[in-house]
Image (tube, rainbow, N blue to C red):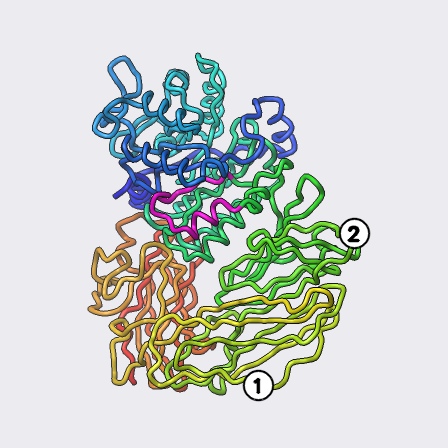
Amino acid sequence: MKRRLTVLLALLAGLLVVQTPARAVPPVDSVAASAAASQQVLSPTPYMGWNTYYALGGDPTEAEVKSIADFLVSSGLRDAGYQYVWIDGNWAAPTPRSSAGDLVANPDQFPNGLKPLVDYIHSKGLKAGIYTDAGPYIPGKCGLGSHGYYQRDANQFAAWKFDAVKVDYLCGIAADLDPKTVYTEFAQALRNNASGRPMLFNLCNPVTSPDWGNYPEEQQSTYSWSYAPAIAQSWRTYTDVGFVGEIKFKDVLRNYDANARHPEAAGPGHFNDPDYLGPELGMNDEEFRTQMTLWSVAAAPLVIGSDVRKLSKTSLDILSDRDVLAINQDAAGVQAVRVGPAGTTETWVKRLANGDRAVVLLNRGDSPATLTTKASSVGLSGDRFTLKNAWTNQVTESAGTISAAVPAHGAALFRVGRAMGQPGVPHVVAGLPQVTKVGGDAVPAGIAPVVAGGDEARVEVTVRNDGARPVFSPRVELAVPAGWTARPVGKAPKLLTPSSSATLAFTVTLPATATPGSSTLTATTSYEMTGKGRLRQETATPLVVAPAPPDDDVVLSHHDWISATSGWMSPTVDRSVGGWTPISMLGQEYPTGLGVASPSTVRYYLGDRCTRLTTSVGIDDAVRNVGPEGGTSTFQVIGDGRVLFDSGVLGRDDVRQADIDLSGVRVLDLVVGDGGDGGYNDRANWAGLNATC
């Protein structure tokens, strides 16, 4: 296993015990005030770059790092601002220090040492970063530690001409050190290095996040904001955003939410750090575009975690979008805050240096939605506003409403300012095609719709005019896959006045032979505007066509699911999560079922073919090998949006049997939630899963 996953599993096994007295939290205003006086402003805007950890795992090599540096140049990423090439852990030799006490690079990975590699990176117009740990080197628990050698290592990094240092805390927590004390000492060593070389300091203590144990507050990553602004250019605000080769959207949202707790700590030269960008490591393009949106308004460092050499043009375009990067690099260095309540849909706003606002309309849900806010709600006054969509570059004018059609797991990003001069193009929102009914049944709000061969569905597209002038003759054309039919329902209005909307509907019929998998509904919305002719917008929504339903009594875990998620790793058929051991609860093994970690949703299509489901639910006995903490979950069986079974909170000593009526259920969701322990030691089982169909 790779470096951090190995250490996290060691933590889960109870190898590292932490007992440290609490300390008072200093007022953040005093921290922010001291930051400007105590450090050179090395990064007035968030730094940008690439890191080896998620891309190359635990064994980066000189050849790989050089190849990445070359690609950053040839792809244009360097010129877009991605300057830092950061060598993360596992760069040191198996015995990391020489007899004289100097750090030594692994000769198998770096046969020429690190100095020539740094010179090569610099020759490409790039900067170089390196990794160490704040604790002492402890064989078997962490691969490298600088405790006791802070000044010596800072001097060595400077002599090698590194431009940035990431300082982890794996060895630090293993040695039960105080983060504030040791990080402050390391920061001073960096500032006082013998070469007088400026080096960025990224403070990184993610292993002490609540997800991984019950640590004292002052040792947790969530406490770093209280002291890090005075000593570092950035500080990690939560656990890792993923594992090597795997960054999931749910964890992106988790890290963003944790990062958002203390926006007041961020400012020019010192920034909250929610971890790395993860294109093509487990997210689709829409989800990664959302991560890029959120990291940009958070004034977060933009460090790519993927192997950039393998990225698609779409991912590279997302990474290098000028308008989005301009929002991240805004000179004010302000971090976005939420406007209004938290929920499935949210509004976030970031004040920009020229007085404009960057506004995010975020859709965390599983179905598309049209989201709105008011200019007055984001701190702007007036009656005319210019909206520039940072992703599409479309510029429109609004009379005060900021709105967008946002896909599932998507985010709209606008730069909003007061309008001047002649009236502009009205801000008209062409909605995404939305399935509102399948057969005679309404699709529950926020739930991803599912259709099957032979189904008839109602699809709606809502068009709204948030401009100050009317638009005329709105029309919608709906394109469906080959063999499907789409028939308009009703008539379109002749005009849309300001602050009005119209919903145009279609009846979509699938052939009985519709191919299971992902399909797309595409709407072309057009309307006339005086002096501009007919304008058009195209919107598209993915739609899942279900596999065939069960046609006999089945073990449901052996039937094809529509989709399946697990909090870490992936759902495992007939094994506990991870696949290491049979499903076992209170000493009894079960031959069939599903092993998952929260949060988890496994979705099946039943097509009203089944009448009964029996299962036993609880926490797998595997948690008994990894310490006494955590190990709680909740289990729900949901049919077409209705809760059919709810276990309540179950601990490691609880097993509950369920006998559930499935009559009339088309779509079945098996949902596992966190029982309040942050997911720690969470290995949940759906044992049996016998369906009568």
Q: Kindly identify the amino acid type of the residue bearing the numbered disc 1.
A: Val
Can residue 599 be seen at all in this image of the molecule? yes
Check the picture and name the quadrant holding the N terminus. top left
Q: Nearer the viewer, mark 2 or mark 1?
A: 2
Q: Nearer the viewer, residue 405 or 640?
A: 405
How crowded pointer 1 is (Cα within 10 Å; few <14, some 14-19, many 20+) is rated as few
- Secondary structure under tag 2 reads loop
Pointers 2 and 1 in contact (C-beta within 8 Å): no
Q: Residue 98 occupies which quadrant of the picture? A: top left
Q: Position of residue 304 (x, y in %)?
A: 42, 42
The residue labelled by disc 2 is 421
Check the picture and name the quadrant holding the C terminus. bottom left
Q: Residue 170 occupies which quadrant of the picture? A: top left
Q: Residue at x 43, y 43 (%)?
A: 276
The residue labelled by disc 1 is 489
Q: Position of residue 29 (x, y in %)?
A: 65, 33
Q: Nearer the viewer, residue 215 or 132?
A: 132
Left or right, 425 with reference to 506: right
Q: Kindly identify the amino acid type of the residue bearing the numbered disc 2.
A: Gly
Q: Residue at x 47, y 58 (%)?
A: 286
Q: Nearer the viewer, residue 169 or 214?
A: 169
Q: Residue 174 occupies which quadrant of the picture? A: top left
- Secondary structure under tag 1 reads strand
Q: Position of residue 198 (x, y in %)?
A: 49, 20
Asked if residue 390 is among those painted magenta in the image, a careful observer would answer: no
Mark sitting on residue 519? none
Asked if residue 307 is among those painted magenta in the image, a careful observer would answer: yes
Where does the magenta region start and end? 301-321
